[in-house]
Amino acid sequence: MFSVLESEVFKKLNKSRKDFIVSVLWHIMSIRGRINFLQLGRFSTICEQTYRNQFVKKFDFLSLIPG
């Protein structure tokens, strides 16, 4: 079984970026309804502005999918 946490792309990230990506993936799966920065900030310990700032940085989420 392939794990996102074991992918080469994920291993190259620093700890703070890894923690952020894990938080995003976890909250996207757990929040019902519309997913936006306000909702992510409301249901996590990370503030809304941090989500906005982190999503400005480039990251290829599709590279985490095994293929």
Image (cartoon, rainbow, N blue to C red):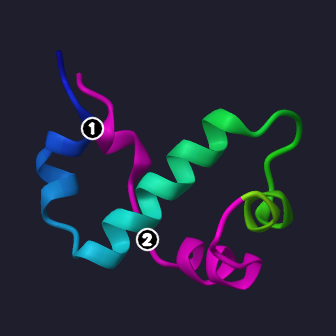
Residue located farthest toward the top when viewing the structure as drawn: 1
Q: In this view, does 8 lie to the left or right of 60?
A: left
> Label 2 neighbourhood size at 10 Å, few (<14), some (14-19), many (20+)?
few
x then y, percent, for residue 14: 22, 76
Q: Is residue 67 left or right of residue 33?
A: left
| In the depicted structure, whether residue 17 falls above or below residue 64 | below
Q: In which quarter of the image is residue 20?
A: bottom left
Marks 1/2 in contact by CB < 8 Å: the verdict is: no
Q: Quadrant of residue 2?
A: top left
| In the depicted structure, whether residue 23 falls above or below residue 53 | above
Q: Is residue 57 left or right of residue 66?
A: right
Q: Element type at marker 2?
A: loop
The residue where tag 2 is placed is 58
Q: Check residue 55 for magenta coloring.
A: yes
Residue located farthest toward the front when viewing the structure as drawn: 45
Residue at 83% from the left image edge and 58% from the top image edge? 39
The residue where tag 1 is placed is 4
Range covered by the magenta-colored residues: 44-67
Q: Quadrant of residue 53?
A: bottom right
Mark closer to the chain start, 1 or 2: 1
